[in-house]
Image (spheres, grey):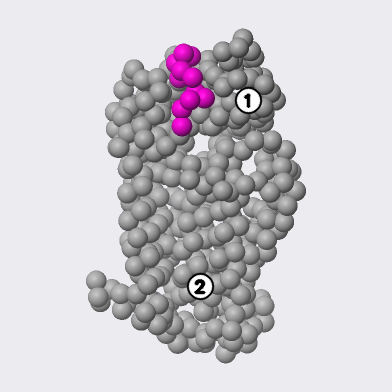
Amino acid sequence: MGAYLHKTTSVTPLVVFRMIFGLMLLGSIIRFWSKGWIDELYIQPTFFFPFYGFEFIKPLGSYTYWLFAICAVAALLVALGWYYRLAAITLFLSFTYIELIDKSTYLNHYYFTSLVCLLLIVLPAQVYFSVDAYKGRVKPGHQVPAWTIDSLKLLITILYVYAGLAKLNSDWLFHALPLRIWLPAHNDLPLVGFLLNEEWVAFVFSWIGCLYDLSIPFLLWYAPTRLLAYVAVVLFHGLTALLFPIGMFPYIMIVTGLLFFSPDFHQRVLNRLAQWLALPQAFMESTRLSRYTPPTEFCILILLLFFFVVQLLLPFRYLLYPGELFWSEQGYRFSWRVMLMEKAGYAQFTVKDDRGHQVVVNNSTFLTPLQEKMMATQPDMLLQYAHLLRNHYAQQGFHQPQVYVDSYVALNGRLGKPLVAPTINLARLEDSFAPKTWITPFDDEIIGF
């Protein structure tokens, strides 16, 4: 381990990643803004679903545009390496704040992006080919500790391997679910669309998807298979972008795959870019080793150790909870479980009190269509919404309101059933990390991780 920590490498893979990642985030924010999603998702709703423990993250109303603007500027500055450290901190805080405003917009790739932004804060991505280096704000350097780049590769490896482990379940492997439900919806694709109606195709996609996730990071690490593996990365994520509405995730993974390429490859990219920008040759010729001071390096390594221990353990927290994970979703988020289930349902709430008041709630009065859809199948969001109704109707004159839900949820094509018994008064329950014993038992078995 001591020898590894003293090993150095060219910083060029980290520099190229910094530039592409920053520009990609900038483009994502511009796209998000231009499509009106800031208004639709963060300003129009009257109620938001905060993450447990992060209730202090509040929506900002029309100031949300400023938050996105700050995030966009920070992404651009990170790409340029201009006031890099401050920009990386700002990018992490602003992006993560946006992510934490509303649970109903949670996506795995938002979580991954936040983690990458967090890592970039401590990595020396600005010591070469940056405005900071050009202006002399940091000492230019070409060599950095190898672990700085390997830490990003390790995060990518964890994402893939855990996503692959999550696919080792009976629904995915032996029933091709939920792909057997989703693929026929794309049978209008040119040339190959008719194949998506075939059940065997869903099985092929399921097994290839699982094998891909479990093997691709190791094939990228290994030089002889790297190029072929990267072709597979482009094809695999290009296909998922074509078939599924998962935003920027496929493109982010295609970019992160470049990190595994050799420093020579990235140096050629930077040399070509330097020619286009007419940068002075001296700017590109640094061979200096850029290292942290020993106390700084020790602190960063301790933080990284803690970071990766959390990343390795957090996805397995579901083992602390009884019942079926896909049904209760206790421990589902932040665990790299990507597109593993098709859950559909509805939730009809009734509020009443002991003085004869009673009302059947129209959910659209309080929630957007997206929020209602997500709330209807996720128990913790059902409870949060019930508390909203409890508080609202208490202000409307109900005495100690009782909130009941008539829910109906179908998981991976199974017959629907209540997620919560209609006799349970949700107004009296409180959310916590403890098992949610009020969730109706799944009464079926999905074997696997």
Which mark, by number, is residue 447?
none
Splitting the image into 4 quarters, where does residue 27 fall? bottom right
Name the residue located 52 percent from the left edge and 85 percent from the top edge: 140
Residue closest to the far bottom: 282
Magenta stretch: residue 329 in it? no
In this view, the residue in front, 101 or 211, is 101
Percent position (x, y) of residue 298? Answer: 34, 75
Percent position (x, y) of residue 234? Answer: 50, 51
What segment carries the magenta color? 420-430
Q: State whether residue 200 is above or below residue 135.
A: above
Magenta stretch: residue 423 in it? yes
Q: State whether residue 336 is above or below residue 281.
A: above
Residue 51 visible in the current orientation: yes
Inspect the image, locate mark 1, and give the three-letter code of the amino acid beneath it. Ala
| Chief secondary structure of the magenta portion | loop
Q: Is residue 64 left or right of residue 373?
A: right
Splitting the image into 4 quarters, where does residue 363 fall? top right
Q: Which residue is mark 1?
A: 394
Residue 272 visible in the current orientation: no
Looking at the rendered image, the disc whose residue lies closer to the viewer, 1 or 2, is 1
In this view, the residue in front, 420 or 293, is 420
Q: Which residue is mark 2?
A: 125
Q: State whether residue 143 is above or below residue 428.
A: below
- SS state under label 2: loop
Percent position (x, y) of residue 306? Answer: 35, 60
Inspect the image, locate mark 2, and give the three-letter code of the amino acid beneath it. Ala
Percent position (x, y) of residue 442? Answer: 37, 20
